[in-house]
């Protein structure tokens, strides 16, 4: 897996980076937003892609 496909997912509530993932940048042009579990908020929250 190459580093240019790696993305960080940040919690929109507490603003902490919780997850690393990858995406195909050729097919997905917009920023990714997924509902995932935040261990700091202790609930499912929306996570957005960061730089």
Image (cartoon, rainbow, N blue to C red):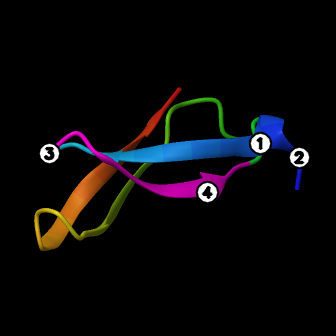
Q: Which mark is residue 21?
A: 4
Q: Which mark is residue 2?
A: 2
Q: Is residue 44 above or below residue 27?
A: below
One can see residue 27 in this view: no
Residues at discs 3 and 2 in contact (Cβ within 8 Å): no
- Indicate left or right for 20 with 2 as reference: left
Residue extending farthest right: 2
Crowd rating for badge 3 (residues with CA inside 10 Å; few <14, some 14–19, many 20+): few
- 24 within the magenta span: no
First in residue order: circle 4 vs circle 1:
1
Secondary structure type for disc 4: strand
Q: CA distance from mark 2 to mark 4?
A: 11 Å
Discs 1/3, front: 3
Q: Is residue 39 above or below residue 26?
A: below
One can see residue 29 in this view: yes
Q: Which residue is mark 1?
A: 5
């Amino acid at each position: 897996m190459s580093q240019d496909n790696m993305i960080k997912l940040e919690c929109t509530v507490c603003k902490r980076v919780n997850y690393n993932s990858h995406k195909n940048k050729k097919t997905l042009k917009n920023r990714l937003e997924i509902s995932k579990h935040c261990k700091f908020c202790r609930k499912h929250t929306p996570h957005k892609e960061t730089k």
